[in-house]
Image (tube, grey):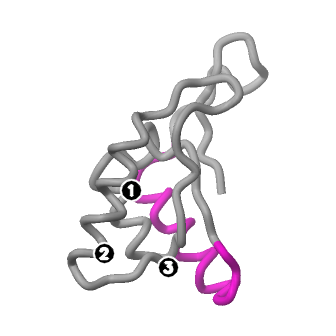
Amino acid sequence: MNFLDPRPGTPFADRPLVPQGEALRAVAAFRLAMPSTQLRFAGTELALGDDGTEAGLMGGANAIIGGNYLTTFGRPMEKDRDAVDRVMEGGARPG
């Protein structure tokens, strides 16, 4: 699952970002529709932010595709690792 980063010069350049609540509902809907699928998400830094990334892991995603992407810079890998660690320390398991 990849959240849109509207890039200048592309057909979707003028599209708005997905609001955090809608992004989290999409994660939950995918988990409900496909309970045994490995659900990974990317592009979370814009659509979800730090707190939303953790909520997405607790709400259905199994993993984060972190680091830089083909056309954009992601957030530092350490931030994604920290988010996973906080979820795990709280006794939850991603997905």
23 is within the stretch colored magenta: yes
Find residue 1 and report its horizontal and vertical position in percent.
Answer: 65, 57
Question: Which stretch did the figure color magenta?
Answer: 18-38
Disc 2 versus disc 3: distance between alpha carbons?
Answer: 11 Å
Residue furthest toward the top? 9
Location of residue 72 by image quarter: top right
Report the amino acid beneath label 1.
Thr
Residue with the mark numbered 1: 53
At a point 53% along the width and 45% down the height, the residue shown is: 66
The answer to whether 56 appears left or right of 40 in the picture is left
Q: Residues within 10 Å of mark 3 (few under 14, many from 20)?
A: many
Report the amino acid beneath label 2.
Met
Who is closer to the viewer here, 94 or 34?
94
Residue with the mark numbered 3: 95
Location of residue 16 by image quarter: top right
The answer to whether 86 appears left or right of 64 in the picture is left
At a point 44% along the width and 76% down the height, the residue shown is: 94
Label 1 vs 3, first from the N-terminus: 1
The relative height of residue 35 versus residue 80 in the rendered view (above or below) is: below
Label 1 vs 2, first from the N-terminus: 1
Q: Residues within 10 Å of mark 1 (few under 14, many from 20)?
A: many
Residue with the mark numbered 2: 88
